[in-house]
Amino acid sequence: MNRTEFIIATAVILFVAFSLGWFASWLVNRFTRVTKAEIGELDKMAQSLHEAEETRDQAITYLQQREAEITNQLSQTEAELRAAMDGLREARREAEELRGYIEKQNAD
C-alpha cells in the first residue's frame, strides 16, 4: 500500500465515521424532538402551576390576616379578663372590709 492509497483509505474511513456520526445525531434529534402537542401540554402545566402558586399566595395572605385578627382578639380578651379580675379582687376586698365593719358594729 503506497502513500496515495493510504491517504485515500484514511479519507474514506474518516468520511464514513463523519457520516455515521451525522446520522446518529439526526436520529437522536428526530426521536427527542418536542412536538407542538407536547409544547401545548407544557404550556397548560405551566399555567396551572402559576395559578396554583397564586392561590397559595392568596391563602397565605388570608391566613396571616386571620392570625393577626385572632391575635388582636386574644389581646383584647386578655385585657378584659385582667380588668374583670381586678374588679372582682376590689369587690372582694370591699366586701371583706364591710364584713369587718359590720362585725365591729355588732360587737359594740
Image (tube, helix red, strand yellow):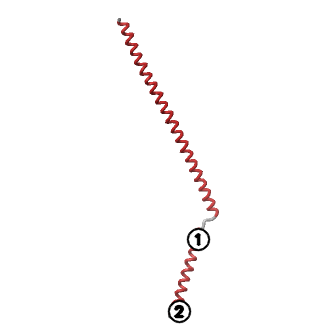
Q: Is residue 95 left or right of residue 58?
A: left
Q: Which-is-in-front pick, marks 2 and 1?
A: 2
Q: Residue at x 48, y 30 (%)?
A: 77
Can you identify the residue that label 2 sits on?
4
| Furthest residue in direction left, as rendered | 107
**How many C-alpha atoms fall within 10 Å of the one at disc 1: few (<14), some, or many (≥20)?**
few
Q: Residue at x 52, y 36 (%)?
A: 69
Q: Residue at x 57, y 71 (%)?
A: 28
Q: Residue at x 63, y 65 (%)?
A: 35
**Mark 1 element type:** helix
Q: Reply above or below: 54 against 27.
A: above
Cα distance, mark 2 to mark 1? 37 Å
Can you identify the residue that label 1 sits on?
29
The quarter of the rendered structure image containing the C terminus is top left
> In the rendered structure, which disc, 2 or 1, sits on the residue that comes first in sequence?
2
Please state the total of marks drawn on the protein image.
2
Q: Reply above or below: 18 against 2.
A: above
Residue 44 numbered mark, or none:
none
Mark 2 is on which residue type? Answer: Thr
Mark 1 is on which residue type? Answer: Asn
Name the spot of residue 49 as percent of width and height, x first: 58, 53
Name the spot of residue 3 as percent of width and height, x first: 50, 92
Name the spot of residue 106 as percent of width and height, x first: 37, 7
Q: Is residue 68 left or right of residue 104?
A: right
**How many C-alpha atoms fall within 10 Å of the one at disc 2: few (<14), some, or many (≥20)?**
few
Q: Reply above or below: 103 against 47.
A: above
